[in-house]
């Protein structure tokens, strides 16, 4: 199984900026903090960086979703990349990483700086509803494209959309609020051990069950939290990774998929996301490893229900079994069968749009996860996305 | 026909494909795109039939009857003045399995909405848009 492009690529660096709600520092400064720290961690110089990749690319409308693009970083750092690209419509957050993998494997570059910056907290400090629809300052008079099928029905957040799926899943499999709540409780318990997490106060399942409903069954603790912060990763060709400062991390397999929620089309089954299953099958078809080999899982949690869907799509448990699997939290805790979202995930560490999960996987595999370190972590899985989908199986030799 | 008070909704921009769906309510009609070659319904409207590959789709009136497949009671106001709670639901139209609309359920206490509930179309008029929404319909079982 050496023909897959990801087998030629290593992760050699990863870092995050400060995380705040909001940060006093400009988004570009946060970005450079993360990029420079990741390059240093990889033991590289600026001049070694010959590729740049980001998701989704700059959206300069003031809503803070993606205030910094490749050209900003290229100019600020004085880079001359041979290859660059933004994955606006790729496989969600993992698209920029997948593109970097393919650029390296096809010989276009050797060291790609992948970054993602969000400044939604700063935008909302200025304009309370920034980003709901229409950008930073003005609410749009009309909605267009995929949003035009949801906005007229006041579904201005993804929360009620995913709540439709959550309720269908609850009904189909008898899942309960107490079971779903285990995701949020676990997230806070992990975040308490992560000094860079945004919400570090532990909660109990009773706190969860009495918290504010957003769109039932999803409560405030089921929704991730907007932040200001940046993540950077360095992906390197395996031949260029031999002198890395840290053990280069293998990308043992990747999986990609997509399905229709975001454009208003529906697959007819509201109990999961078909694109997640596509991504999961692709990942396991490219490796001899199995879910039994995993030491941890960093699973996308923009909304808690997505974590359950992803766990099933990745084969961590059977279809319809994820809610019972996580109930009580013992099996997903640091000493459990599969420690889950050890940074606190997006629910508690902040909405890095998937990049926080990949960053945390790297920290675990390098043994740099401090109090939340999974003992002797050698392999783990990362998944990103609620609309487009991507997953990575990362391993340390 | 419903005329709402309070904060206006963010209406859809109109184009030739979606205009029938958003304006058919002016005549009390719910218009859904249908393939001229194989008669399969499709929503959102587009001029490519995923069932047969045909390019000749046209808006046709449906019965306006359906059932709630899944729903949520949304309690968070996403903009100032938005009326909450409201129900967002996936309604499957009786014309075809898998023909879903994502809509609001109105005319009923949100706590009374149930999966499987029979519903019938109504329209909220705002500016030039007649927004299809659904309300409970006791007579739906007779249509099965």
Image (cartoon, grey):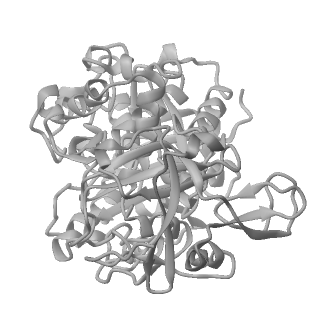
> Does any portion of residue A362 appear in the rendered image?
no
Q: Residue furthest left?
A: A201
- Locate residue B89 relative to residue A257 in the image: left or right: left
> Residue, x 35% and y 31% (percent of image)?
A366
Instruction: Tell me where residue B93 appears, x and y as whole percent.
Output: 62, 51
Instruction: Tell me where residue A368 appears, x and y as whole percent.
Output: 27, 33
Residue A131 to residue B143: above or below: below
Residue B44 to residue B142: above or below: below
On-image quarter of the N terminus of chain A: top right
Tag count in the figure? Answer: 0
Residue A372 to residue A232: above or below: above
Q: Quadrant of residue A152?
A: bottom left
Q: Which sits in the foreground, A155 or A85?
A: A155
- Locate residue A341 relative to residue A164 in the image: left or right: left
Q: Which sits in the foreground, A199 or A244?
A: A199
Q: Quadrant of residue A246?
A: top left
Residue A7 to residue B21: above or below: above
Instruction: Tell me where residue B59 appears, x and y as whole percent.
Output: 73, 70
Q: Which sits in the foreground, A260 or A396?
A: A260
> Residue, x 39% and y 59% (percent of image)?
A116
């Amino acid at each position: 199984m050496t023909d897959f492009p990801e087998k030629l690529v290593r992760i050699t660096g990863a870092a995050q900026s400060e995380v705040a709600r909001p940060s006093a520092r400009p988004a570009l400064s946060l970005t450079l903090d993360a990029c420079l720290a990741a390059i240093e961690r990889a033991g590289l110089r600026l001049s070694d960086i010959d590729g740049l990749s980001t998701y989704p690319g700059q959206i300069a409308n003031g809503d803070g979703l993606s205030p910094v693009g490749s050209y900003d970083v290229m100019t600020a750092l004085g880079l001359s990349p041979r290859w660059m690209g933004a994955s606006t419509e790729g496989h969600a957050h993992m698209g920029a990483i997948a593109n970097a993998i393919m650029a390296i494997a096809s010989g276009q570059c050797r060291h790609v700086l992948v970054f993602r910056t969000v400044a939604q907290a700063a935008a909302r400090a200025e304009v309370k509803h920034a980003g709901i629809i229409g950008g930073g300052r003005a609410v749009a008079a009309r909605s267009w494209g995929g949003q035009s099928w949801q906005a007229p029905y006041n579904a201005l957040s993804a929360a009620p959309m995913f709540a439709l799926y959550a309720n269908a899943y609850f009904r189909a499999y008898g899942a309960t609020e107490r079971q779903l709540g285990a995701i949020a409780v676990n997230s806070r318990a992990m975040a308490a051990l992560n000094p860079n997490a945004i919400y570090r106060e532990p909660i109990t399942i009773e706190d969860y069950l009495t918290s504010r409903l957003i769109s039932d069954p999803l409560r405030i603790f089921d929704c991730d939290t907007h932040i200001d912060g940046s993540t950077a990763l360095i992906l390197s060709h395996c031949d260029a990774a031999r002198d890395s400062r840290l053990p280069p991390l293998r990308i043992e397999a990747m999986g990609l998929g997509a399905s229709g929620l975001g454009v208003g089309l529906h697959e007819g089954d509201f109990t999961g996301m078909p694109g997640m299953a596509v991504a999961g099958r692709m990942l396991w078809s490219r490796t001899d490893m199995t879910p039994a080999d995993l030491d941890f899982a960093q699973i996308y949690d923009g909304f808690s229900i997505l974590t359950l869907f992803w766990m099933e799509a990745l084969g961590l448990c059977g279809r319809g079994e994820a809610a019972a699997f996580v109930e009580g939290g013992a099996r997903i805790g640091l000493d459990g069968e599969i420690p889950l979202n050890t940074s606190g995930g997006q629910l508690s560490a902040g909405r890095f749009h998937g990049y926080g999960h990949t960053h945390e996987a790297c920290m675990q595999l390098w043994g740099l996860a401090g109090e939340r370190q999974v003992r002797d972590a050698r392999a783990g899985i990362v998944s990103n996305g609620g609309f487009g989908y991507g997953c990575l199986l990362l391993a340390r030799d | 026909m419903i005329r709402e008070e309070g904060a206006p909704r963010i209406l859809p921009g109109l184009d030739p494909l979606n205009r029938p769906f958003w304006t058919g309510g002016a005549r009390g009609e719910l218009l859904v795109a249908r393939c001229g070659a194989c008669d399969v319904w499709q929503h959102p409207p587009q001029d490519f039939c995923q069932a047969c590959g045909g390019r000749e789709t046209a808006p046709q009136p449906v019965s306006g009857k359906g059932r709630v497949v899944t729903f949520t009671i949304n309690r968070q106001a996403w903009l100032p003045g938005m009326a909450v709670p409201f129900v967002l639901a996936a309604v499957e139209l009786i014309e075809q399995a898998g023909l879903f609309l994502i809509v609001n359920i109105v005319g009923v206490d949100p706590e009374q909405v149930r999966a499987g509930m029979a519903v019938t179309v109504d329209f909220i008029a705002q500016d030039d848009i007649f927004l299809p929404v659904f309300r409970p319909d006791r007579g739906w079982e007779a249509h099965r």
